[in-house]
Image (cartoon, grey):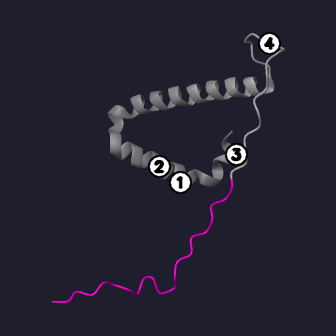
Amino acid sequence: MLSGLTGHLPEIIIILVVILIIWGPGKLPDVGAAMGKGIREFRKASSETHDAVMGTSTATPAPAAQVAAPPPTPVQPAEPVAVPADATTHQPSVSG
């Protein structure tokens, strides 16, 4: 598990020191608990999404007579906007 972190160890230490300075040692357990809860929720949502995509979900299967939606239309790239080369040099003159 730590083999992927060894290359980024100095950055991780700097981030942890900054977090300690910002929230202080009293709030550190609360911050850690919130981060752990967020990671657990992310993993749960990720596994649910993976199960739904792979079709191994425990939910009831969809009816066989379901009509498939039409494929999405491809997005066309926007046309480039032509700007005259001297457009930035013209400024209104003030006469007075």
Is 19 positioned to the left or the right of 68 in the image? left
- Residue to which mark 3 is pinned: 3
**Percent x, y for residue 34?**
45, 29
Dot in front, 2 or 3: 2
Which span is picked out in magenta? 76-96
Query: Disc 1 versus disc 4: distance between alpha carbons?
Result: 51 Å
> Where's the N terminus, which quadrant?
top right
Query: Disc 2 versus disc 4: distance between alpha carbons?
Result: 50 Å
> Which of marks 4 and 1 precedes in the sequence?
1
- Residue to which mark 4 is pinned: 63
Q: Element at badge 2?
A: helix
Q: Element at badge 3?
A: helix
Query: Disc 3 marks which amino acid?
Result: Ser
- Residue to which mark 1 is pinned: 11
> Which of marks 3 and 1 precedes in the sequence?
3
Mark 4, residues whose alpha carbon is within 10 Å: few (<14), some, or many (≥20)?
few
Query: Disc 3 versus disc 4: distance between alpha carbons?
Result: 46 Å
Query: Disc 2 versus disc 3: distance between alpha carbons?
Result: 19 Å
Residue at 50%, 49% (x, y): give it: 13
Tag of residue 27: none
Whether pointer 2 and pointer 4 mark residues with C-beta atoms closer than 8 Å, the reply is no
Query: Disc 4 marks which amino acid?
Result: Pro
Residue at 33%, 32% (x, y): give it: 26
Residue pushed farthest right? 64
**Percent x, y for residue 61?**
78, 12
Main SS of residues in magenta: loop
Tag of residue 15: 2
